[in-house]
Amino acid sequence: MHAIAHETPEATILVVDDTPANLHLLRQIMGARGLTVRCAPDGARAVKYARSNPPDLILLDIKMPGMDGFEVMQALQADDITRQIPVIFLSALHDVIDKVKALSLGGIDYITKPFQEEEVLARIQVHLRLRSLQRSLEEKNAQLEEALSKVKQLTGLLPICAHCKKIRDDQGYWHQIEIYIREHSEAEFSHALCPRCVKILYPDLYDRLKVCRSED
């Protein structure tokens, strides 16, 4: 389990539990593995802490006086800042109904009490990895969307002058065709002369090139 410290050295866990002994034990288990642990002794402060400085993962007790774990989860899900934070519920061993409700509200997993160090670390490790992969995917998707937003495509019917070949834009202005295409696509131009234009503009050069081609 020592791998957690190397794989997620800056991971922050918010532990929410109204029992000081549980907070102390979980802080001790995770702190020994290099994880940063923040504690909230009640639901209201848990929501406040999560909003002000979102953690990488939340361990949330279900049964607490005042704002219980279910209400905390609903508050987290209702806020854009905290909605994506993975939540592992802390539940008594036999509270099956509570576990089902916790998962239906958006919890990703649960850890049973009394806590077993190996179970706590294993579940945290799995979900921190998943969170890291999710963030990486989100970043790549954002980069892809940014790249796609920069891609411009020419579609539809373009009004073009039959004589000078200028293109009319939506505001009624006329532009050189290469300028218009450059501004509305990712195309770049290099300039050259086609054989017909060489013949018209530089007939002597055209004749010499023609002789060279015939000799070849």
Image (tube, helix red, strand yellow):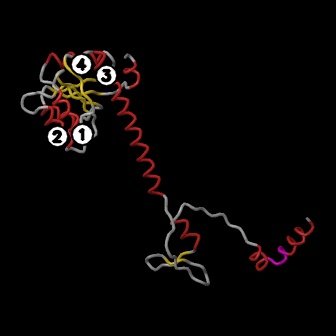
Amino acid, disc 2: Ala
Mark 3 / mark 4, whichever is N-terminal: 4
Q: Nearer the viewer, residue 213 or 118?
A: 118
Q: Nearer the viewer, mark 4 or mark 2?
A: 2
Quarter of the image with the N terminus is: top left
Q: CA distance from mark 3 to mark 4?
A: 9 Å
Is label 1 in contact with label 2 (beta carbons under 8 Å)?
yes
Q: Is residue 66 above or below residue 117?
A: below
Give the residue at x 6% y 31%: 66
Disc 4 element: helix
Name the residue located 38 percent from the left edge and 33 percent from the top edge.
132
The circle drawn on residue 82 is 1
Secondary element under disc 2, as helix, strand or loop, is helix
Mark 3 or mark 2, which is nearer the start of the sequence? 3
Q: CA distance from mark 1 to mark 3?
A: 20 Å
Residue range corresponding to the magenta coloring: 202-206
Q: Is residue 73 above or below residue 6?
A: below
- Which numbered dot is residue 27? 4
Residues packed near mark 3 inside 10 Å, few (<14), some (14 to 19) or many (20 plus): many
Mark 2 lies on residue: 75
